């Protein structure tokens, strides 16, 4: 009952918006069932009329009626197939969107445990396996059940013995298939899980092709892939054996059913109880039951696959993010003050990434954040963006704890300029606005000129409507300026620059420095520095070491103190001191 309820919940959720189409599909199927039930009776009448030497014109009329009914039956079947596929495509797309949105809402601890490949398999592979479940399962199962009952009713009308015999046969056939189906569900579940692991490994491998080839690890990767494929095959074999058991069971049952119908028809005809046309009718109705029972069998096979996918989809939906939305708004405009109150953080069971971070950055001021790789600089940025919550302590933005703030406000009021820039396969407008239609073209054009991208923009053939491919044809500096403009268009109160100039040459870096000054004007800023001159205009300096604050203070005061760590960095060089 729990399984049936789960299936029904999923069906009702994603088919409800298409209830009119589903109702139309039901009507079409009912028309088709009626035609299938009465067409054999017309053919029975034709056979009996022909054998008895009936009127030629009546034979022609009966044959014409038969062909018209067959034609209409085929048309209704075609229309039903089209409508069911359309319903399935719409329903599965809605489910894909919901799954993708759910994955994006889950916190980063979830994404660290699940590769992008395995998530793609969940969102695409599992949902694709549910396509037939949405398009045909309930409607087809009900329609075929009605067809089977209709066939049995027609047989009882012809002769009660035929009705009883074939009723017993239909009951045994359906019972046998339902019993065999139970073998397959756990096997298909294991197969779907292994498929996700394989696609996850393949996705990670292709993403890291450059590093793999550079380090000479191609052979190792191929061995690992071979091991995954070898583990995959037995699971596939077991699932296909379960599929074959249902198919073989159906084949044997209908072999017996056909023999039974011929034997029964012969006995009744020999006794003079029925006509030759009725013998054909009994055989035809027996064969007609093959189709709905075959379709029920096919639906059971799809249900085996769907059961595994439904279980995995429900497991994914059941996961809750550790990051829950707050109810306190952040200031809609102006710079945001930043305050860390004894913040500690660790990634799961790993060593502490931040320990006892305690400082206050006034609104409109800029903090230069220095430290070795792994010292906790990027972790602080992730906490401010609330990709994670502190293990203990509290972070406040504009006096509001991040844990209590609305996530939508955090997304809008905290801007990040990362090292790597993602250029989407979309229009220039969409790349600047990140698909936010509320941002007007005038603001986009102003940002393009403010961040010195006008020469690149003027070369585009269709302006804001120009389609950009992967990479967008931008240089590294232009791509980073695009990132600056994106952040500026959101008008954040806090801007975090995560080593935004680490991969640029010195000439381009000067351009980025001007963009940085424009972006930080009137805003609070945190500059995670790779090169020392990047923080020369910062108001405060913080140096992290192993997740703890080694030194913090006003830049001018640290600069005036020859004993400070910052002064030593200026004398020796950031790269050498923090290597």
Image (spheres, rainbow, N blue to C red):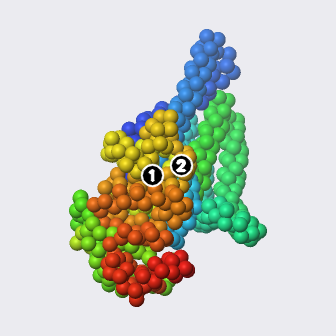
Q: Quadrant of the N terminus?
A: bottom left
Q: In the rendered image, which quarter is residue 249 located in?
A: bottom right
Task: Give the percent coordinates (x, y) of residue 490.
Answer: 33, 54
Residue 347 in view, yes or no: no
Q: Secondary structure at mark 2?
A: loop
Percent x, y for residue 481? 45, 53
Residue picked out by circle 1: 482
For label 2, count other residues whose C-alpha is less than 10 Å away and answer few (under 14), some (14-19) or many (20+): some
Q: Is residue 328 visible?
A: yes
Q: Are marks 2 and 1 in contact (CB under 8 Å)?
A: yes
Residue at point 60% right, 49% down?
298
State the separation of the CA atoms marked 2 and 1: 9 Å
Above/below status of 413 relative to 68: below
The residue under the point 54% across, 63% down is 503
Badge 2 or badge 1: first in the primary sequence:
2
Residue that badge 2 annotates:
474
Q: Is residue 167 above or below residue 376?
A: above
């Amino acid at each position: 009952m729990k399984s049936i309820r789960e299936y029904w919940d999923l069906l009702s959720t994603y088919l409800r918006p298409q209830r009119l189409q589903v109702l139309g599909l039901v009507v079409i199927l009912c028309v088709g069932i009626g035609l299938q039930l009465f067409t054999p009776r017309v053919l029975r009448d034709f056979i009996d009329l022909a054998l008895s030497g009936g009127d030629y014109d009546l034979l022609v009329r009966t044959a014409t009626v038969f062909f018209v009914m067959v034609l209409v039956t085929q048309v209704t079947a075609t229309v039903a197939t089209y409508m069911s596929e359309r319903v399935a495509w719409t329903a599965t797309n809605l489910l894909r969107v919901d799954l993708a949105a759910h994955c994006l809402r889950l916190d980063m601890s979830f994404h660290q445990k699940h590769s992008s490949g395995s998530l793609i398999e969940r969102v695409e592979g599992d949902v694709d396996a549910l396509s037939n479940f949405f398009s045909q399962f309930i409607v087809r199962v009900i329609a075929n059940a009605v067809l089977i009952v209709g066939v049995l009713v027609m047989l009882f009308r012809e002769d009660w013995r035929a009705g009883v015999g074939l009723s017993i046969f239909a009951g045994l056939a359906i019972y046998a298939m339902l019993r065999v189906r139970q073998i397959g569900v756990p096997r298909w579940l294991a197969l779907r899980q292994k498929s996700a692991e394989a696609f996850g490994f393949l996705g990670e491998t292709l993403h890291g092709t450059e590093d793999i080839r550079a380090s000479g690890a191609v052979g190792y990767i191929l061995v690992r892939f071979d091991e995954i494929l070898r583990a995959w095959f037995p699971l596939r074999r077991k699932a296909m054996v379960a599929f074959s058991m249902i198919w073989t069971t159906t084949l044997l049952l209908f072999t017996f059913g056909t023999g039974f119908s011929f034997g029964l028809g012969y006995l009744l005809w020999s006794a003079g109880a029925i006509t030759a046309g009725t013998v054909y009718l009994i055989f035809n109705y027996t064969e007609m039951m093959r189709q709905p029972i075959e379709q029920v069998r096919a639906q059971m096979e799809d249900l085996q696959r769907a059961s595994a996918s439904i279980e995995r989809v429900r497991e994914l939906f059941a996961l809750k993010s550790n990051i829950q939305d707050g109810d306190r708004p952040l200031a809609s405009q102006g710079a945001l003050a930043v305050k860390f109150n004894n913040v500690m953080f660790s990634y799961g069971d790993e060593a502490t990434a931040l320990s006892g971070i305690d400082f206050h950055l006034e609104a409109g001021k800029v903090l230069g954040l220095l430290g070795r790789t792994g010292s906790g600089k990027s972790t602080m940025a992730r906490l401010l963006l609330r990709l994670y919550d502190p293990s203990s302590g509290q972070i406040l933005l504009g006096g509001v704890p991040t844990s209590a703030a609305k996530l939508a406000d955090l997304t809008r009021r905290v801007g990040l300029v990362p090292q790597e820039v993602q250029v989407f396969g979309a229009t220039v407008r969409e790349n600047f606005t990140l698909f936010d239609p509320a941002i007007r073209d005038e603001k986009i054009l102003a940002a393009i000129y403010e961040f010195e991208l006008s020469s690149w923009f003027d070369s585009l053939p269709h302006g804001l409507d120009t389609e950009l491919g992967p990479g967008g044809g931008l240089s590294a500096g232009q791509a980073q300026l695009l990132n600056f403009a994106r952040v500026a268009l959101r008008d954040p109160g806090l801007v975090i620059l995560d080593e935004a100039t680490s991969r640029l040459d010195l000439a381009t870096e000067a351009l980025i420095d001007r963009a940085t000054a424009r972006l930080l004007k009137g805003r609070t800023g945190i500059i995670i520095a790779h090169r020392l001159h990047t923080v020369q205009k910062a108001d405060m300096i913080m140096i992290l070491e192993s997740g703890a604050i080694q030194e913090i203070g006003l830049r001018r005061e640290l600069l005036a103190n020859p004993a400070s760590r910052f002064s030593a960095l200026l004398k020796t060089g950031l790269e050498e001191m923090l290597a």
